[in-house]
Image (cartoon, grey):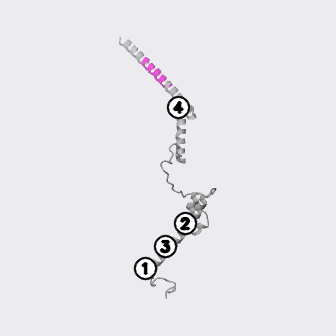
Amino acid sequence: MPKGGRKGSHKGRMRTYTSPEEIDAQMKEEKERKKHEQDQVAEEGSAHNVEDKLPGSGSEDSDDESSLRKKTGVESLIEIDNPNRIAQKSKKVTQIELDEPQQLSRREREELEKQKAKERYMKMHLAGKTDQAKSDLARLAIIKKQREEAARKKEEEKKAKEAAAAASRGINSLSLK
C-alpha cells in the first residue's frame, strides 16, 4: 500500500453541487440582510440629521458620510485615516479661483531656483565678479601678452631677415658692378 493510503486524500471523491433552490434562498437571505442593515443605517442617519438641526451642534459633513458607509470587520472597532487616500471632490467652475497663484511641486520649485541661480551666476561671470571669471581674465591677459611678444619677435626676425637680404643684395649688386 502506498505511503499515506486513502485516509487524507480528497481527490476522487464525488463532487457536491449546490442546487439552484439553495442558491436562490441564499440570495434572498442576503438581500433581506442588506435591506435590514440599510434601514438601520437610515434610522441612525435620521437621528444624526436631528442633531445637526439643533443649534450649536459640532458635527461635520465628513462624519455623516463616514457613518452612512457600512464598516466591516475591524474597521468598526478602530478609526483609521489613510493619509494616502484622497477623496475626490469635484469643484464647480464658479468655485475655482484663477487669481490664486498655483502651488508648484517641489521638483518644479527646485528647477526654477536652479535656473535663476544659473542666470545670476552668468550675469556675475560676464561682469567679471566671480572667481572663475577673474582667473579666466588673468589667463587671457597672460595669453595676450605672450601673443604680443611672439608677434613682436616675429616682426624683429622678419626685419632682420629683410635687412640681411637687403645687405646681401647690396653686396651682390656691388660685386656685379
**Which of the two discs, 1 and 3, sits closer to the camera?**
3
Region of the chain picked out in magenta, as a range: 149-163
**Which of the two discs, 3 and 2, sits closer to the camera?**
2
What is the three-letter code of the residue carrying label 2? Ala
**Which of the two discs, 4 and 3, sits closer to the camera?**
3
- The residue indicated by pointer 1 is 20
Q: Around disc 2, counting alpha carbons within 10 Å, would you say few (fewer than 14), some (14 to 19), or many (20 or more)? A: few
> Dot 4 lies on which element?
helix
> Dot 2 lies on which element?
helix
**Spatial separation of the CA atoms under disc 2 and disc 4:** 74 Å
Mark sitting earlier along the chain (4/3):
3
> Dot 1 lies on which element?
helix
- The residue indicated by pointer 2 is 42
**Spatial separation of the CA atoms under disc 3 and disc 2:** 16 Å
The residue located at (57%, 58%) in the rendering is: 62
Answer left or right for 100 relative to 168: right
Q: Which percent across, then down, holds residue 45? A: 56, 64
**Spatial separation of the CA atoms under disc 4 and disc 1:** 87 Å
